[in-house]
Amino acid sequence: MKFQLALFVFGVLAFTTSQPVNDEDLTDVIEAEVEDDQLWEIPQIDGSFKWMTEQEAKDRTLKTELIEKAKWVVKHFSNKRRKVRFFLYTQRNPSKWQEIDMERPETLQRSNFNSSHPTRIFAHGWLGGVHAPQTIEIVDSHLANGRNENYNIIIADWSVWSMTVNYYLARLRTRKAGAKTAELIDWLHENTGMPFETLHVFGHSLGAHVAGFTGKQVTKGKIKTIIGLDPAMPLFRLKNPHNRLAETDAEYVETLHTNGLKLGFFNPIGKAAFYPNGGRKQPGCKRDYHGGCAHLLAPTYLAEAIAKGYGNSFYSIKCDSFEAMKKRQCSDFDEEIRMGDPENYKKAEGVYFLETYPFAPFGMGDRYIKERLGL
Ligand SMILES: *[C@@H]1O[C@H](CO)[C@@H](O)[C@H](O)[C@H]1NC(C)=O
């Protein structure tokens, strides 16, 4: 317990940009309805899982002494900045972000944001932030992309909300984090004419659902593409698409599944779903009991796809169904469809299987698939 508190305090101190966790923050999200008494394996801060119903998770959250202590810490050590902050990287500022603050329009005017360039927004997961390795991978892959394209890369940093030992609380905040991100998109569209046609939103784990809630709450247009990177499973229900990332949240929604049935969703929830190595375990991960390694590979795979641009070598084979994928009965090969490719919106639909190498570069290329299929 002491160790966990220390970790949390450290997290809070490291992110001194946070706003106090005021009562509104805690109570309005906790009023969320408990839907049923399904048992969930809820991730714990030490990487393990605890079996709990949503009601138990909620009760723990309300009772936990940690939250009280956390409130105290945040109150004493934070300033009054925003809960979701937006950090921009471009080719002109590849190593130092510029903050875009809707309350201070001059931050946009003075920035390198250029609406002629495609915009990419990334939402991190539980305990993540602008400095998390997965965030940096996604940023760097765009800066060194094989298409020689200039992007506006914006990190939706909701770490003030995601930095909690309590996964349940972080999960409840994904909708609000999405609302803020949707607000930013509408605002950028109005102020710079940023087209929706070239806007892609990516999210990892809980961030995949932040991306979904963003798509649901945008009002001035429809996001072109959302890519959900191993969308978090605990406390998200297949039967409730309004309460998670769903196929209708963008013109095209793609999902990558790397740790299905543990930290990640296993069922396809986008228009196209890619299952590297079957979507549950990854060959680069040894003794991955808690699934953290496989779960973190989803952003790594996407980063490789982006960095390689037209050389993206995550060729995939279409399966007739999710059931067929589980049995590896997949045989429909179209070399234009590759996991994470920005052109996928034109054709990709359904369930895809692929294998990867256990180390970078992970993509195996088309020769492997042709051999496998005897082409
Ligand atoms: C925005 O990008 C376009 C296309 O790359 C370029 O022609 C234009 O000069 C840029 N605008 C600014 C203000 O840099």
Image (cartoon, helix red, strand yellow):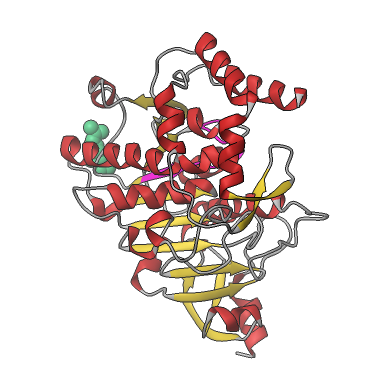
- Report x, y in % for residue 7: 69, 25
The answer, for residue 247, to whether it is visible in the render is yes
The segment highlighted magenta reads: 120-133
Q: Residue at x 27, y 38 (%)?
A: 183
- Report x, y in % for residue 47: 73, 43
In the rendered structure, the answer to whether residue 112 lies left or right of residue 335 reads left
Point out the residue furthest to the right here.
287
Q: Quadrant of the N terminus?
A: top right
- Work out whether residue 56 or residue 106 is closer to the camera in this orientation and state it: 56
**Would you say the magenta stretch is mainly helix, strand or loop?**
loop
In the rendered structure, the answer to whether residue 314 lies left or right of residue 123 reads right
- For residue 97, above or below residue 298: above
Q: Residue at x 56, y 66 (%)?
A: 313
- Report x, y in % for residue 225: 36, 58
Residue 130 belongs to magenta span: yes
In the rendered structure, the answer to whether residue 191 lies left or right of residue 299 reads left
Q: Quadrant of the rendered structure where residue 252 is? A: bottom left
- Work out whether residue 102 or residue 300 is closer to the camera in this orientation and state it: 102
- Report x, y in % for residue 266: 58, 66
